[in-house]
Amino acid sequence: MIAYLIRRLLIGIPVLLGVTVINFFIINLAPGSPADLFLSPTATPEDVARTEAELGLNKPIFVQYVNWLTQLLHGNLGVSFQNREPVTQLIGDRIGPTLLLMGTSLVVAYLVAIPIGIIAARRRNTVVDYGVVGASFLGISVPHFFLGLAMIYVFALTLGWFPTGGMLTLGRGGGFADRLSHLVLPVVVLATAIAANMVRYVRSSMIDAFGQDYIRTAKAKGLGTSVITNKHALRNALIPVVTVIGVDLSALIGGAIVTEQIFQWPGIGLLTIQSIGARDYAVLMGINLIAAVAVFAANLLTDIAYAVVDPRVAYA
Amino acid sequence: MSVTPLLQVDGLRTEFSTDQGPVTSVDGVSFSLAPGETLCLVGESGSGKSVSALSIMGLLARNGRITAGSVLFEGQDLVGLPDRELRRVRGHAIAMIFQEPMTSLNPVLTIGDQLAETMILHLGLTKAQARQRAIELLEKVGIPRAKDVVDDHPHRLSGGMRQRVMIAMALSCEPKLIIADEPTTALDVTIQAQILRLMRELSAETGTAMIFITHDLGVVAEMADRVAVMYAGQVVEETDVYTLFDDPKHPYTSALLRSIPHITTPAGDRLNPISGSVPNLLHMPTGCRFHDRCLQAMDRCATEPPELLPVASQHSVRCWLYDETEVPA
């Protein structure tokens, strides 16, 4: 197992390197230069050239990439073009709220989706099942931005139950209840898509498990429905579901960018949008690297989780 | 019948609803079983053997239901019993062994856990007691290193070993009846012989009655006290195993016995198959269900369905050849 993990981590190095290469060139392909956004419309070509030189943008793109990489090896992600703050510090400030949002969404989504998926599977081809499948189809289809705006309109503006955005009410110190009420709407938006997808996986893999011979054996032993469902079927059904968790994590990162923007949630997603607007290459590269590491870690964790839930899987 | 039967199946009829309409898989099956006796249900695929067994256990698929008949187990009718009460019988007084040892055990639970849970449920043992008894049971069914195997998952065991585990599981609550649905069909021949011997020994030792389902007449000769031959969802002949092989009455039984090659049959001789094929359950022939394949069919066979009637003590046949006008009861 340990040898396997070391091998996986070593394979990760070229993968992550490749991701940074692709990201770096794609970002540089985007029209517009950070210098344009820094300077006033009256700036002379000399001003532009001087600013670009300051930011290191006048060098060939390969040199720029190598410079960035050299910095990275020294544990340095560079300095934001926009406000001269170190990128590590910018990301460090923002990562907490994002982890809070994503973590809560993931937990809420699974707590909702797994029981609902089980119920739908147990009542296959009944009104309950059709309702669940229909609702999950809707949940998958609705884009984050639409659901987010609809939630704000209904629950924040019209009903006034929750704040429209932000992470805490300014001037009120931001106690637990205050933070929680800010968390509700963005979590609902993010969790909806994850849960809607997960329900379908849980449902179909429970239906599959219920049809297996070992379930018939369990029934022949005289076991009750709840033991059969929760012990014999669910444990098997979770094996394919584990795969989805890795995919969900990547989807969450994308979803968080949009959701944070809509709810003005002060996390990485909001920082991403701001940095794209400012063509802040240094910050964007930092965020991309973090995201790539997160996805890589999620996949590795998925594989480890496999070995935990399925005794037939052994890594050597 | 001198002994009170342990199990008395009477006029059992099981229907499945399908896309093509209702299909009757088991139609008026009756047989009885004395304590400690082994009854073989023998027949071709689709003759209703397994469905009969699953009907007794109340384990039919969602689209199946018993539409007529009764299953008296120790005098209690299991048909129509609420699931909660049926569960007290399943795995306790009646245990079942299935055809597919490779898939019948839960892959994510340990052998010990799967053995123990039945005993904890039905016998009220503690976890530690159940584990101890699980090890004893594994030793009893001939599994080497039982102390280690008890903590293994099923994928570590071969098919034959898994079937031994299934047998241990069936025996765990000292049932009065074990229903074994082709327990050796999925195993290779040498393992088959071992498993059959084990089951015979254990049933003799514990006095457990068995319903042994098979399509293999060799297995019947090995295992059975009594035999019920099934064809197209009905029992066509029921008798003790010696009479069945020496003096089969039903033309289907005779044809089945003739179709088996004998060790003295010269090489190159052709087999004697039964011409035609098993009728489709959706289009059951009128009259006797075997008449269109029967060499001795008469006119009335095509129109009038025969009843399962005694031709001798402990010997019943469903055939017009033995109508009371010819064989006085």
Image: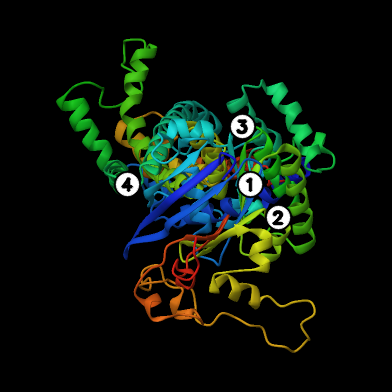
> Label 1 near label 2: C-beta < 8 Å?
yes
Q: Amino acid at mark 2?
A: Met
Return the residue found at the far bottom. B268
> Badge 4, how many Cα within 10 Å: few under 14, some, many 20+?
some
Q: Nearer the viewer, residue B259 or B317?
A: B317
Asked if A292 appears above or below A83 in the picture, the reply is below
Q: Amino acid at mark 4?
A: Val
Residue A260 at what x, y percent from top left?
36, 34
> Label 3 near label 1: C-beta < 8 Å?
no
Residue B293 at what x, y percent from top left?
48, 80
Residue placed under numbered mark 4 in the picture: A133
Residue placed under numbered mark 3 in the picture: B118
Numbered circle sitting on residue B223: 2
* Mark 3 element type: helix
Q: Which dot, 2 or 3, sits closer to the camera? A: 2
Question: Which residue is depicted at the point 31% across and 15% down?
Answer: A170
Chain designation of label 2 = B
